[in-house]
Amino acid sequence: MKKLALVLLAGVVMSTAGAFAQDKSVTTQPTKVFTLSGTVTEEGKTLVSDKNDEWTVSNPQLLKGQDGREVTARCRLDPGKLSLHILSFKPEEVKYSANRGDSAFHR
């Protein structure tokens, strides 16, 4: 009888520990890296995405001097706070095109 009670008690403790471990994993932040394109606002404090979502930058010193420019950033997102931590970024290149019909090509 004591063995049965001990086995049941061990089963209850193990299932409780398993449930606690599952709850703990849900609250941890994902470590997945995302790529986000958008426009840097003043002093690099926010990044406005192509879908007009405004993300607060947790490390704005990285984007200083990029005000008003389009960038593509590799970052970790916190969707609950609409904030992101930038790991690296690359300014978008401005592409120019010439039209042979423009007045600059006429003699």
Image (tube, helix red, strand yellow):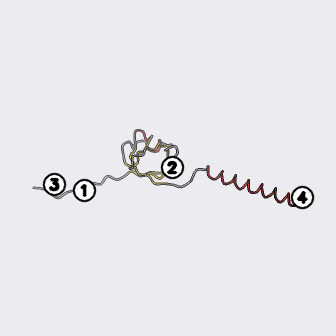
Q: CA distance from mark 3 to mark 4?
A: 95 Å
Q: Earlier in the sequence, mark 4 or mark 2?
A: 4
Q: Earlier in the sequence, mark 4 or mark 1?
A: 4
Numbered disc in front, either 2 or 3 = 2
Three-letter code for the amino acid on which mark 3 is drawn: Asp
Q: Looking at numbered disc 4 in the image, what kind of residue is underneath it?
A: Lys
Q: Residues within 10 Å of mark 1 (few under 14, many from 20)?
A: few
Question: Which residue is pictured at 44% across the width and 42% down the height?
Answer: 46
Residue shown at 16% from the left, 54% from the top: 102
38 relative to 103 in the view: left or right = right
Q: Nearer the viewer, mark 3 or mark 4?
A: 4
For the residues labelled 4 and 2, say whether their Cβ atoms are less than 8 Å apart: no
Residue named by callout 1: 97
Amino acid at pointer 1: Ser
Amino acid type shown at disc 2: Leu
Circle 3: is it few (<14), some (14-19), or many (20+) Cα within 10 Å? few
Q: Are marks 1 and 2 in contact (CB under 8 Å)?
A: no
Instruction: From the image, tell me which residue sits under label 4.
Output: 2
Pick whichever of labels 3 and 4 is earlier in the sequence: 4
Element under disc 3: loop
Please state if 105 lies on the left or on the right of 46 as rendered: left
Q: Write down the residue under mark 2.
A: 77
Mark identifier at residue 27 = none
Element assignment for label 2 = strand
C-alpha span from label 4 to label 1? 85 Å
Q: Which mark is residue 102?
A: 3
What percent of the width, then of the height, locates residue 3?
A: 88, 60
Q: CA distance from mark 2 to mark 3?
A: 45 Å
Q: Is residue 97 left or right of residue 4?
A: left
